[in-house]
Amino acid sequence: MKLARPSLLSYPDYVGMLDPYYSRNPLIRHYFWGRLSRLLSLTSWNETDQILEIGFGPGVLLPTLINLSNNVVGIGPESLKHLSSICAMLKNEQINHKVNIMNGDACKLPFKDESFDAVIAADVLEHIEEIMEALREIRRVLKNGGHLLTCVPIESGLRRLLRRTLGYRLPRDLHTHIKVKESITQSFHVDKICCYPKLPKSFLLIKARKQLTI
């Protein structure tokens, strides 16, 4: 899937995790953008879909989601300064009227039951201590048949090399990719699981579906 990448110039202030997406090294850029493209390609999209992105981070995926849907919401534990920078980026990209972003807790989503057709949580679930509580909330706000798309890092030599190249230290993950996969399986029907890239395997990508009965 082709992504709508926001211009780096659209950000008035630096926000965390921008460096990999706008690295001078084309291989690093391809690696990080490619995983998002592969994740979104796991399912089909309809412009009437209601999409929620949990943990939108630097907001790089929001312009693409807006092209896929008429209603996009982003929520995460972001500071007011961070939210202000992302709002400015959306305004500079002329898409601020199509998306709503807010500070919030994945374990206490402020939405009605069955509000969304799809929930995206990229590199998020492994950092949530109460992962089952977050998954229950995701299941609650998803419509029956709605999809959860998530990716979680698999520790690898390539991932360690990228961190050294970028000079970036990741916080210690609370959950392994195995734990995340097992937790999702308890609450959802898993449709697809794949790795990105195929070799070396650095991210586990999962498409799961809400069913009334598991």
Image: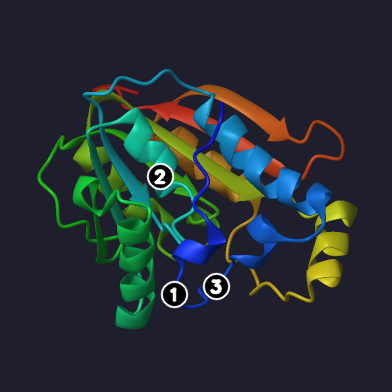
Instruction: Estimate how packed mark 3 is, as few (under 14), some (14 to 19) or many (20 or more) residues with alpha carbons within 10 Å.
Output: few
Residue drawn at (33%, 67%), measured in percent from left and top?
88
Residue 74, placed above or below residue 66 = below
**Where's the N terminus, which quadrant?**
top right
Residue 134 coordinates in the image, percent (x, y):
34, 54
Question: Is disc 3 placed on a helix, strand or loop?
Answer: loop
Residue marked by disc 3:
16
Tell me the mark number nearer the camera, choosing from 3 and 2: 2
Question: Is disc 1 placed on a helix, strand or loop?
Answer: loop
Query: Which of the 4 image quarters holds residue 126?
Result: bottom right
Task: Tell whether 185 sits left or right of 68.
Answer: right
Question: Which residue is nearer to you in this view: 186 or 128?
Answer: 128
Marks 1 and 2, the one that precedes in the sequence: 1
Q: CA distance from mark 1 to mark 2?
A: 17 Å
Query: Which of the 4 image quarters holds residue 37?
Result: top right
Question: Which residue is nearer to you in this view: 109 or 89?
Answer: 89
Residue marked by disc 1:
12
Q: Is residue 106 visible?
A: no
**Mark 1 vs 2: CB contact within 8 A:** no
Marks 3 and 2, the one that precedes in the sequence: 3
Residue 212 coordinates in the image, percent (x, y):
23, 23
Amino acid tagged 3 = Gly
Q: CA distance from mark 1 to mark 3?
A: 13 Å
Residue marked by disc 2:
63
| Disc marking residue 86 | none
**Mark 3 vs 2: CB contact within 8 A:** no
Residue 144 coordinates in the image, percent (x, y):
22, 24
Residue drawn at (74%, 45%), measured in percent from left and top?
31
Question: Is disc 2 placed on a helix, strand or loop?
Answer: helix
Amino acid tagged 2 = Pro
